[in-house]
Image (spheres, helix red, strand yellow):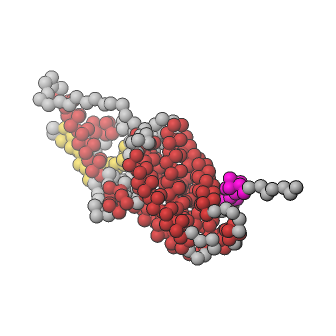
Amino acid sequence: MMNQPESYSYFHALRVYVITSLRAISRNPSSIVFGFIFPVIFIVIFGFIGNRTLNLTIGMIQNDSQENPMMEMLSHIDQIKLVRNLDDVALTEKLRKGEVDALMRVEKADSGYVAHIQTSDASPNGIVVLNMLRGLTAQANLLMMQVQHVPLAIAHTTIEGRRYKTIDFILPGQLGFVVLSSGIFGAAYLLIALKSRLVIKRMFATPAPKSVILVGEAIARMLFALAQVSIIVLIGKWVFGFTLINGWVTLLMMLLVCLIALMVFLGFGMIVSNIARHEQAVPPIANLIVMPQFLLAGTFFSIRVFPEWLQPVCHALPLTYVNDALRKIAFEGAGFADVGFELMVLGVWGVVVYAVAVKLFKWE
């Protein structure tokens, strides 16, 4: 009696495709560069910039009143650097170049001291120095008056809160950049390579449907993205103090949002791979999708800085909602219900994109 042929295993076909795709991704230099190196470089740069405090430099013009109450107060402020070892001409030149924020000359007068302040448009911190010196002068005058009753007083209290650091804005934007580039460029290049080598065409001879390839590619990219996002978040947390308000729970929620976003961007990548005829055609086509989102979706700065006529375009981009959702989850402790609108917009984009991707899918 002849043995009956075993039924075709779609799960086995899917598993083989996922493993093959993961190997191809890990051996692709662009996946490492755009997925790990570039985002880490941006995080390191902006992390160090964001951790800097505002330091002011004041050049002291030489005169006879070097020891005075103003000098005494400024010498006790750590964020202020006093430059005293240069002549007036050199200090004026530094002020013109913005290398010092202000120049100060204190004169002795009959009623006390007069501080002459000089600023320049070359340094945006000149007005900060001026307002700070005005505040110190008012405070010193009030203390020296030694009055018991003041017509107007200020009672100041503070409440506990979280400091919103630069890294808290930049890192979610870099995660968005990772899933955007991984989904579009990664999927497009990989599928084009498989088609050019007739790998996908050979799959046509198997019982595997189109969905096995699409789902297999999505799973492989999702697994790779989990590693990318986890490493970037942990670097930001341990090195620069990135805010994970609820710890590991927040990290898991961010991973889920990134996976949802990756699914959407994979659809864009599949569309690109079916429009482009060869690998050289991928960058110009893909950049038509990537660059507007990279620049306008709040990756490096808030979209509120753009003109009002451009902001509706920013709000139409899917990456905008990825970045917003990640920032709300990480810093505000938002749950999925709180970012439901962002996820809904991504879902709509996903339905449209995959409908187009399946329609345009070609075996070669």
In this picture, residue 302 sits left or right of residue 18: left
State the residue at coordinates (55%, 52%). 40
Residue 219 point in image, percent of width and height: 61, 53
Q: Quadrant of the C terminus?
A: bottom right
Q: Residue at x 33, y 39 (%)?
A: 74
**Image quarter in which the N terminus is found:** bottom right
Residue 272 rendering spot, x and y as whole percentages: 53, 69
Rendered image quadrant of residue 220: bottom right
Magenta residues (range): 8-21
Q: Furthest-top residue in view?
A: 148
Q: Position of residue 9 (x, y in %)?
A: 71, 55
Camera-side residue of 100 and 187? 187
Tell whether 155 sits left or right of 186.
Answer: left
Q: Is residue 43 visible?
A: no
Seen as rendered, the residue at the extreme front is: 1
**Residue 89 falls in image quadrant:** bottom left
211 in relation to 76, above or below:
below
